[in-house]
Amino acid sequence: MSQNILLQKAIALYLDDWKLPVITDYHLGLFVFRMHQEKIYRGRPITINKSVPEISDFRLLLKKCLSDGILNINKDFSGRVVFNILGASNSPAEDIACTVNPFAYMSHLSAMDYHGLTDRNPLTLYISSPSPSQWKHFAAERMKKDLRENFFDYRETGFPLLKKILLKKVNKRPIHCFSSLHLGSYRNIKDRPLRVATIGKTFLDMLRDPNLCGGVEHVLDVYQEHAQDYLDLIVEEIHQHGKPIDKIRAGYILNELLGVSHPLITQWETFIQRGGSRKLDASGDYAPVYSKKWRLSINTIKERTKRANN
């Protein structure tokens, strides 16, 4: 028969099993609450008299973990909300960011770097996250899934909630968090907490936010060098999730600039606006040089210069 253990010992075992680079107050609170319900971990009974803990119980356990050195406060985050685990190896900033924000993923220039699309080595870590209202909704749904029938009891105790933690800098790397109404396509990286924008989504982000992707001139270089290698992924992503202006810009780059043909690109021609003032680079000034086919002002320096020399 297994010998009973104290809850503090169960926490130490749990942290040893925890495979993520850091742990948040919510996940620690979730474990403590669950153990009061289940009273067993790793097949060993836990000595607990209560079925529903009080917030004072959690605070006392956290204080003991900190004083024993099992946990220490991660100072990249304000407050006592993210903790380093004794013995855990140093992890990349992107892994920590995706652990702290469970609905975020690496995007823009950082995703370009991960996929080998750029020669830039960005110091800033670019991540995308849902809008505040969506984030709150996703968090509530995740908590309901984690706690099931104990969801309302957990909230009533005042235990830590799953909340959005401000990301400014991690492991000395500045964080740029891009918030969007549309979460976008990403994939989970095996054996890591990391999530990364898909290839198609990364190329779509280049069109929408070139300033977060090394600048519009760099974006054009990346399209010229790599777009044909991932053509189907790019075209399908833009066709499904791109706005009309995304399709016009992509149509110009892929069809007119790179000479690529594709049935979906042909369909995008229905979004051409006669007499419009659309620009290849949304942040740049309008230029009188334009694509007759796509009705698009070619307002990037490189493309204007190329046309002037032809």
Image (cartoon, grey):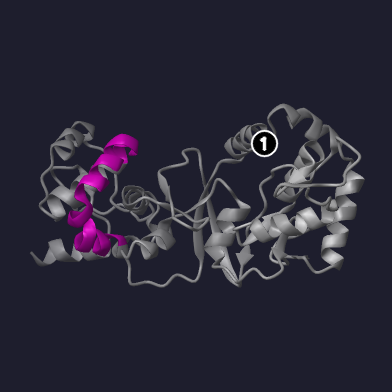
Give me the residue at 65% from left, 57% from top. 17
Seen in the picture, residue 128 relative to 116 is either above or below; the reply is above
**Residue sitting at the far front:** 1
Instruction: Give the position of the C terminus as an image quadrant.
Output: bottom left
**Residue 39 drawn at (x, y percent):** 80, 41
Give me the residue at 54% from left, 68% from top. 92
Image side of residue 53 versus residue 13, left or right: right
Give me the residue at 84% from left, 68% from top. 68
Residue 301 visible at all: yes
Image side of residue 203 versus residue 18, left or right: left
Query: Which stretch appears magenta?
Result: 219-245
Give me the residue at 18% from left, 50% from top. 254
The image quadrant of residue 257 is bottom left
- Which one is nearer the viewer's eye here, 125 or 270? 125
**Residue 136 drawn at (x, y percent):** 64, 37
- Which one is nearer the viewer's eye here, 308 or 75? 75
The image quadrant of residue 133 is top right
Write down the residue under mark 1: 143
**Residue 160 drawn at (x, y percent):** 78, 44
The image quadrant of residue 273 is top left
Number of numbered discs overlaid on the protein picture? 1
Name the amino acid type tagged 1.
Met
| Residue 257 lies in the magenta-colored region | no
**Residue 24 drawn at (x, y percent):** 70, 53
Magenta segment main secondary structure: helix
